[in-house]
Amino acid sequence: MRWSWLFLSLLFVSTGCRHAGIPTLPASHGHLSLAMERLLAKQDRPPGPLWEASLRNDAVLSLDTSTLEVEPEQAPAVFAEVVQILRGTPGEEELTRALRDLRAVCDAGFHEACRFVREEFSNPKMISGGQYQFSKEMLEQQKFAFMVFRCRINTEGQVRDCTIVEGEGMDGAEQNLAVLFRSRFSPATLAGHPMSIPYTFSVRFSPVPRWDGLSTAEVLAWARLRVSQYPQSAPAWGNLALELAEHAPEDPLYPQAVARAHALSPRAWWPATELAWQRVQAGQYVAAMMAVRFPLRRERGNPYVLETGAAAHFGLGQCTEALKAQERAVGLLPEEWPTPERERFQRKLKDYQTACAGASPSRATAASP
């Protein structure tokens, strides 16, 4: 008898297979934005599962722990310098710095850098790995186990330097580390150069088929338990925020979960956007714009990110920017998206147009988002 197991990358859309499809209304802003992202990702990259298409972004996020920012006018020169370095034989530090710089240039809205990373960065791929079997006693306990390991995959494709983010002291944690250490990967590459990168593994063990049969209350209880046990875990807080966004957005813990997820993973687009949306509702437009500035620069436009940026711009009296963002958001909404939502986006655009028509940008007053 065997427990099921699954390696997942650390990303905020890792639960997508369970929540896929057009959402039903009513639904929270956070749930709608994530559902939209999944739909757009499928349209952009039809072959293969969604989480696989998202791995590349996770690897770049893992490397970018700095606060490096590049101004839009500096982006072309920085990009050209990085490309020149990659044409040579860069060392390990140069490769790490190059990928970090590419991310910063992409965040600055220079989409050529985004495309370069998408095309030239290759995430590690598993070549071989073991499958751990629990003891009979553990199987009889019918317990769930979720473990998160922060490791490094070196240029030889070996897993090294692991720390336990979730699961310290849990039965099977050390055995699963041994499974990781025995695994072999093709290493990450940037423009054909093998490189060592940090990598986060999430390993879920569950007595088949009980996990898929959990009730909503059990799923939420599991998510709350994870953050109580591992308060510094970005995956735990991200998972809780996602589950609350779908199942219980009115829960008082939801704003805290979003804020913690953003604080622990500030480059991740979803918690940043949802935090910005919450700040817009509170009239904190400067703080909202600070939170959403990176998601707004992403190469793929998400209408819910754009409407959040539009609301922040409008609250700041920046009519030109607000109208541009909301118009783009309306134009990106798929025809199959729920009609009430498409109508809401259109109404908001008309509100902005009416308010901005008779006021200077500096005197426009924000309508309720």
Image (cartoon, rainbow, N blue to C red):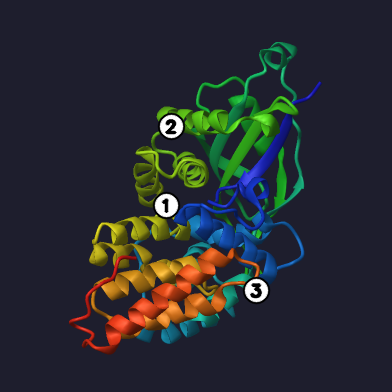
Nearest to N terminus: mark 3 or mark 2: 3
Alpha carbon separation for disc pair 3 and 1: 24 Å
- Structural distance between the alpha carbons of marks 3 and 2: 35 Å
The residue carrying pointer 3 sits among few (fewer than 14), some (14 to 19) or many (20 or more) residues within 10 Å by Cα, namely few
Which image quadrant is residue 305 in?
Answer: bottom left
Q: Quadrant of residue 71?
A: bottom left
Secondary structure category for the residue under label 1: loop
Q: Please, what secondary structure does the residue beneath circle 3 have?
A: helix
Kindly identify which numbered label has been placed on residue 230. 2
Tell me the CA gap for discs 1 and 2. 15 Å
Coordinates of residue 188 in the picture (x, y in percent)? 64, 59
Label 2 neighbour load within 10 Å: few <14, some 14-19, many 20+: some
The amino acid type found where label 2 is placed reads Tyr
Task: List the residue tagged with mark 1.
Answer: 265
Please tell me in which quadrant of the rendered image residue 229 appears. top left
Q: Please give the name of the residue rendered at 55% of the width and 73% of the height, measured from the top-left corner.
A: 300
Check residue 119 in the rendering and tell me which mark sits there, or answer none: 3
Q: Nearer the viewer, residue 2 or 125?
A: 2
Task: Give the amino acid type for the residue marked by disc 3 in the picture.
Answer: Glu
